[in-house]
Amino acid sequence: MRIEVLPSAAGVAARGAALFSALVRANPALVAALPTGRTPIAMYQKLATERTAGNFDLSRATTFNLDEVLLPKSSPQTFFQFMTRYAWDPLGVSSERRFIPDGASADPAQECERYESEIAVRGGLELAILGIGADGHIAYNLPQQAGPRTHVVTLDPATIATLGGGLKGPLRAITMGVATILSAKRILLLATGGSKAEALRRMRDDPQSEAWPCTLFRDHQDLTVIADRAAASQL
Ligand code: PGA
């Protein structure tokens, strides 16, 4: 894993945007896994500005979300709503190529299988852009709830709290699995802020374990971690 340390969160957003942009220029029809969360918002905003200037175009790309909470699409906490607001609309992703697990599925296990086959039908992931949780989760491969393929997890109260809106558990989610994500040809992981410092250190240094799912990703053949100084402070 390569680690790039930038002076600020704005630098991480700019670097992430530049790398993503270069990959889209090389292959405008690329298939990418995209994250939600606070961290990627600045990168999406930068790319939206680039799009307005005519320098970035996702209209031929296909995007797959890393995860989705099991709530109706209309709920403001869904990643469907997040993506519509911060990524799909501002970046011009075609409505036929916006993939996200259906959080209202009556059969979430079957929905996981459907999602895997949608990825496979499109030739697999060329790129995965990831965040990382302070507890080392990647997508919603939470401690002790990592799995190889797309699967259903139960969110812990701390993770539910990050969704805001006063949501109370129990709440489940669908997440891409570790092997699904590792099948991407290239991975960019964005990390900003001191709360991510321990997770990044463990990702690099700890034995691989389900307790810190981030450790399961570090041997990918083309993984670039882009961190600000605070997130890299324990490296
Ligand atoms: P955050 O979430 O960007 O809101 O910190 C990261 C994650 O949970 O992957």
Image: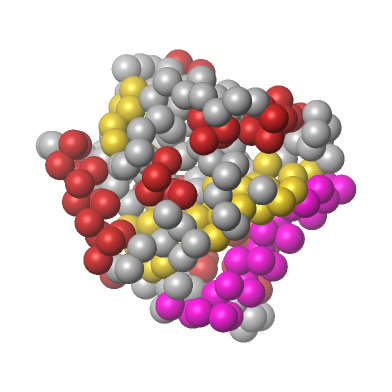
Q: Residue at x 37, y 72 (%)?
A: 94
Q: Please name the predominant secondary structure of the magenta segment in the image.
A: helix
Write the residue at 25% across / 66% down.
Answer: 121
Left or right: 191 with respect to 172?
right
Is the residue 69 above or below the residue 32 in the image? above
Percent position of residue 41, x then y: 60, 50
Whether residue 229 can be seen here: yes
The region drawn magenta spans: 4-29
Q: Residue placed farthest to the right in the image? A: 7
Q: Is residue 18 magenta?
A: yes
Residue at 43% across / 78% down in the picture? 29
| 189 relative to 92, above or below | above
Identify the image quadrant of residue 19. bottom right
Q: Position of residue 18 (x, y in %)?
A: 69, 68
| Residue 67 place in picture, x, y as percent | 39, 43
Quadrant containing the C terminus in the rendered view: top right
Q: Is residue 52 visible?
A: no
**Left or right: 84 as drawn, with respect to 136:** left
Percent across and percent down for residue 37 are 54, 41
Q: Is residue 215 magenta?
A: no
Whether 222 is drawn above or below 219: the answer is below
